Image (cartoon, rainbow, N blue to C red):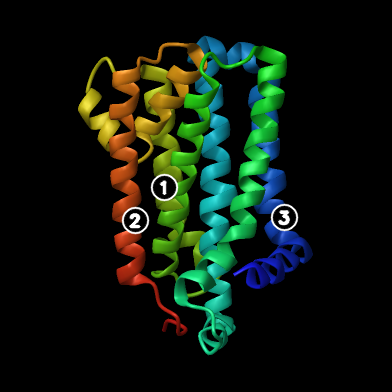
Amino acid sequence: MLAIAHSELLQVVRNRAVLINSLIMPMAASAFFIYFRDVFEGIGSLGYIGVVIVFTIGAFSLYATTVTTLAARRQNLFLKRLRSTAAGDGAIVSGLVLPISVISLIQVGLILGVFAEVSGEPANLPLLALAVIATFVMMLALGIGTAGMTNSPENAQVTTLPLSLGIVAVANWVAITGTGELAWLKRALPGGAAAELIVNAWNGDAQLGTSLLLFVPTIAWVALAIALATRMFRWDPRR
């Protein structure tokens, strides 16, 4: 798995399009929200800005790049060649998505660190870390599932758009309006419960019982995404 991950990391570094889409654009968007934090704090809260940062990186750095990577490796038959080696299916997929997963985690950690430095530290750092990890695991699993329905890296721009924009919209909806109304619907949608967790962890509104319950919908979406990935993922080029 590590050998596959090392090879994939070299591919990421050499691919300017991937670097721009997965690193520069999310960082630019995050910097915009941090710079104008006073304005956006008036719209939602500091926790809202944290949600925007996490889900922007999760949707565009991690999710979209995962789909593009796996679709590209399938199209050039790299996936098929890897299956002829001693590596198992799980090790192959894990090796291919490991570099972008680590890069995304480092990226979100650095940006949230800058945000905390200029606006104040989050009230509950352990809960925030767990919420970010849960969100990223969900986005990664959804990315592997979506890759199964994506014919080519070019087609990934189309197949990733509905889910990435939808999850970001849900996260913004929850972070701005809270869950005072339609709480069950907001928490059941992908990203809704995780967004509430991030807001509560940053603002200091978290209660242990409620926080533990909020992990349930996110974990359920992870399980659903893994089931989708197992069923829909293809090793041979799609037609």
Q: Which of marks 3 and 1 is in front?
A: 1
Residue 225's mark?
A: 2
Q: Name the residue under label 1.
A: 138
Give the side of residue 133 with respect to residue 118, left or right: left
**Image vertical order of residue 102 relative to residue 46, above or below:** below
Proximity of marks 2 and 1: CB atoms separated by less than 8 Å: yes
Between 26 and 1, the residue placed more toward the observer is 1
Tag shown at residue 19:
3
Q: Distance between the residues labelled 2 and 1?
A: 7 Å
Q: Residue 90 location in percent, x, y?
A: 46, 70
Local crowd size for mark 2, using a 10 Å CA cut-off: few (<14), some (14–19), many (≥20): many
Instruction: Find numbered disc 3 in the image and state the secondary structure of the residue it sits on.
Output: helix
Report the residue at 48% width, 15% height from top: 44
Residue 138 visible at all: yes
The label on residue 181 is none
User: Does label 3 or label 1 sit earlier along the sequence?
Assistant: 3
**24 or 95, nearer to the observer:** 95
| Mark 3 crowd level (few <14, some 14–19, many ≥20, 10 Å Cα) | some
Image quarter where the N terminus lies is: bottom right
Q: Can you say whether 239 is above or below 91 in the image?
A: below
Q: In this rendering, would 23 be left or right of 51?
A: right
Kindly report the distance in space between the C-alpha atoms of the residues bearing marks 3 and 2. Answer: 26 Å
Is 239 left, or right, of 179 in this rendering? right
| x and y percentages locating residue 70 in the rendered image | 53, 69
Q: What residue type is labelled 1?
A: Met
Task: Specify the farthest residue to the front.
Answer: 86
Identified at 41% across, 11% down, the residue is 205
Q: Nearer the viewer, mark 3 or mark 2?
A: 2
- The secondary element bearing badge 1 is classed as helix
**Total count of labels:** 3
Q: Residue at position x 78%, y 66% from top?
A: 14
Cα distance, mark 3 to mark 1? 22 Å
